[in-house]
Image (cartoon, rainbow, N blue to C red):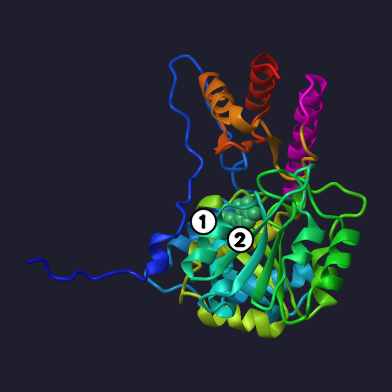
Amino acid sequence: MSVPSPQPRSVVEQIPVYVPGRPPTPRPGLTTYKLSSNENPFPPLPGVIEAAHAAVDLANRYPDMGNTRLYEGLAARLGVPADHLAAGTGSVALIYHLLQAFCDPGDEVVHAWRSFEAYPIAIASVGAVSVPVPLDEQWRHDLDAMAAAITDRTRIVLLCTPNNPTGPALTQTELDAFLDRVPSHIVVVVDEAYLEFVRLDDAVDGVATYRGRSNVVLFRTFSKAYGLAAFRVGYAVAPAPIAAALRAVSLPFGVSTVAQAAALASLDAHDELMRRVDHLVAERDRVTAALRDQGWSIPDAQGNFVWFGVGERTASFAAACEDAGIVVRPYGTDGARVSIGEPEGNDRLIEVAGSFGL
Ligand SMILES: *Cc1c(COP(=O)(O)O)cnc(C)c1O
């Protein structure tokens, strides 16, 4: 006779699997490039490794649970009160915290699709219901359809700008018009993981937007432009009651001493950050222009990545890239995302794309 075994909640079985970007398979005689995770090809900013090393000396002590110095540094840089900030182990953690704080089982979360693949995973993990709204023809958020998808059960709307994995960003005009249509009891997240890379005339000013609204939350990360993906640190900017809720559900001592020190030191290297971001933006624009010259229809690329909407040919496109020594991130039969990396890797992408055939 079998005895009953412990069973996780039924929602656990329904959690989709997160597929991380793969590292390249080493190939003799060929330099390989990992362009599958939107990582920064630059090492951490000047002063950051030194600050992280110094923090290692404190490894016998718990981190500052209040992230005091990091909040002070961010508050000064952004011009927001420290109690409007909530840090987490990457901004992915903040997505989970927000869902935990605002959603009961069955509550609905509206988000674009395709968008950041962590959204449906995090939503499922709290037993909430994902309401994916298809992107429009240009691979952009369809904000009219998203507004129409809001129901009595909606608690959160997730906006991803620039949208990972497709690239386009919202404009301030579009965002304001959308926010005007969302009932004020619904939290609207503006996930700005790639904010530093945006080059638009009517770019979203996240801080000005959250200041004017009681239901807007910004998610930001040190993983992309700042190049600290391994340290796991991100933060939310939110009205005090929402920031307090995020902190209340956070795992205690989540952000390590090393991560806090590295993030703080990164804030001090602002000029170098912007120089590197400008370089990556120039590379992105160079790659996009070259691909369009080859005849590719590449959606507006406002992050540190480009999107190939190759549909059924996604797997063969990814395989062709792999053969040439670059690993990209395929998404089912929608398309493939390729991160902007070292110039040689970007050149390799242009070559492969040119010979792949449209
Ligand atoms: C990378 C990314 C994040 C943040 O990742 P963390 O490393 O957890 O900070 C958040 N949102 C989007 C859309 C991303 O692409």
**In screen coordinates, is 75 left or right of 181?**
left
Residue 119 placement (x, y as % from top left): 58, 59
Residue 37 visible? The answer is yes
| Main secondary structure found in the magenta portion | helix
The amino acid beneath tag 2 is Ala
User: In front here: 275 or 88?
Assistant: 88
Q: Which residue is mark 1?
A: 231
Q: x%, y% of residue 249?
A: 51, 79
Q: Mark 1 or mark 2, which is nearer the start of the sequence?
A: 1
Few, some or many C-alpha atoms within 10 Å of disc 1 (few <14, some 14-19, many ≥20)? Answer: some
As drawn, the label of residue 252 is none
Viewer-closest of 120 and 32: 120
Name the residue: 55% across, 19% down: 324
3D distance between C-alphas at marks 2 and 1: 9 Å
Q: Amino acid at mark 1?
A: Phe
In the depicted structure, whether residue 200 falls above or below residue 1: above
Residue 102 lies in the magenta-colored region:
no
